[in-house]
Image (cartoon, rainbow, N blue to C red):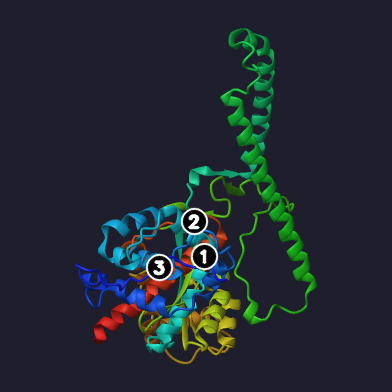
Amino acid sequence: MTKAYRPYSPKQAFLLPPSPTEWLPEDHLARFVMDVVGQMDLSEIHARYQQMDPRGTQPYHPLMMTSLLVYGYCVGVASSRKIEKKTYEDVAFRVIGGGHHPDHVRISEFRRVNLEALAGLFNQVLSLAKKARMLRLGNVALDGTKMKASASKHKAMSYDRMEKDGERLRQKVQELLAAAEAADSQEDLEHGPGRRGDELPDDLRHAESRLARIKQLKAEIEAEARQQDAEARKDSDDDLPPPPAQTPLPKHQIPRTREGGIDPKAQRNFTDPESRIMKASEGYVQAYNCQAVVDEEHQIIVAQAVTNQPPDVQHLVPMLVLAVANCGAKPDRLLADAGYFSEDNVCEVMKWGIEPFIPPSRQKHADEPKPVLGRPPANLSFKDRMIRKLATKAGRAVYAARKTIVEPVFGQIKEARGLRRFLLRGLRKVRGEWALIALTHNLLKIHRAKLRTT
């Protein structure tokens, strides 16, 4: 006996009005999203529902829920409450909903429990771009952007302050407990036998809960530091590096003192402990580091990832591995800014048979590199060779394309679609949400290319 779904027929005609799909133009994005999602493999989502008791409440059809989320992210409506509202007020959302209006709790829960399956649709959309011949893999550009977390940087606390505040709160708790105990008899007289008279005051409850949270975060920092020490010892014992297919994304490292202890400035955020304070264009923000490898031909994202490690340099190799694995082929050239330069990175790119264009230092737009003549000396370092390469006319022309390949992608996501902050919390969840953002970016590119050819 299989789990039954609520009836879902978005193209069902009404008796008096026209077919709901006729409310939208033939080339409307909502129609395109419904067609694409209808061809996707949603078996992982279906399997979860089929494991449920068939006698329970009928769930909304996964095809509808997935289409609502995908279309919502395409047009910059990621909030479950806003999506619910749109199913009443927006024609496109009404057509996708097929007469259903799932409440925001169900939309949010559907996204939460199926987040990894939804993130897996990224490769399906990328395959669609390949079938449409929208990938050339000549020049690809790698860059990162700091996406704000669903948390305020003012809710972060350093390890040093945790220790100081913990001691202060412990003393406060003791003082309040003593005051509460001394007031027991007076409380009995004032409130009578119907009230115990030993209830904790609001100040004490707040102090105890804050102290407990500080202890928890402090313990998490110490546990993460111990785990990093254990991993470092294990890595030192291993003779061989991990194979390329298993190249891990960088992890945030607990800052240490010279003596090996935890740096007093090491921080944790009360709202989203896995997010970190990072430097962005608008200053320091509570954020995650979102990475993307973009193909030049149509600005298709061929690889995406999220970490809580602010520096970009450690992301180059794992992102390159992801891009090659996703595309099943290697690009000719990899373009990246100075934040990704290191001798190891340049060597690794060249080992793959890919030509790197990564400046050792940031180039100001007003500065024109001096032209070079003649053959390079044999004793030049990797850094000097790269500087010389990027100073040639051909090198400048190739690297100049970087800012037209990857930087507009982040502008389209953040400014055009308004997706400047994650809605979800925790590294695993924001990785799923970034995958949704990336796959909907690619869908928009495919849809616009389709419009240009028709």
In the image, 260 versus 129, the foreground residue is: 129
Judge by depth and name the residue closer to the eye, 417 or 254: 417
**Residue 7's disc number:** 3
Residue 449 relative to residue 136: left or right: left
* Kind of residue at badge 2: Leu
Question: Is label 2 in a helix, a strand or a loop?
Answer: loop
What residue appears at the point 29 percent right and 57 percent down from the top-left corner? 88
Q: Is residue 236 left or right of residue 9?
A: right
Residue 425 higher or lower than 246, as above or below: above
Residue 31 image point, x, y percent:
30, 74
Query: Mark 1, mark 2: which one is toward the viewer?
Result: 1
Residue 355: where, in percent of width, then height?
A: 50, 87
Q: Nearer the viewer, mark 3 or mark 1?
A: 3
Separation of marks 1 and 2 at Cα, in angstroms? 11 Å
Location of residue 190 by image quarter: top right
Which one is in front in this view, the residue at disc 3 or the one at disc 2? 3
* Of residues 42 and 168, the one drawn nearer to the viewer in this rendering: 42
**As shown in the figure, which amino acid type bears the numbered disc 1?**
Leu
Q: For the point 36% across and 64% down, which residue is it?
A: 72
Query: Which numbered circle lies on residue 424?
Result: 2
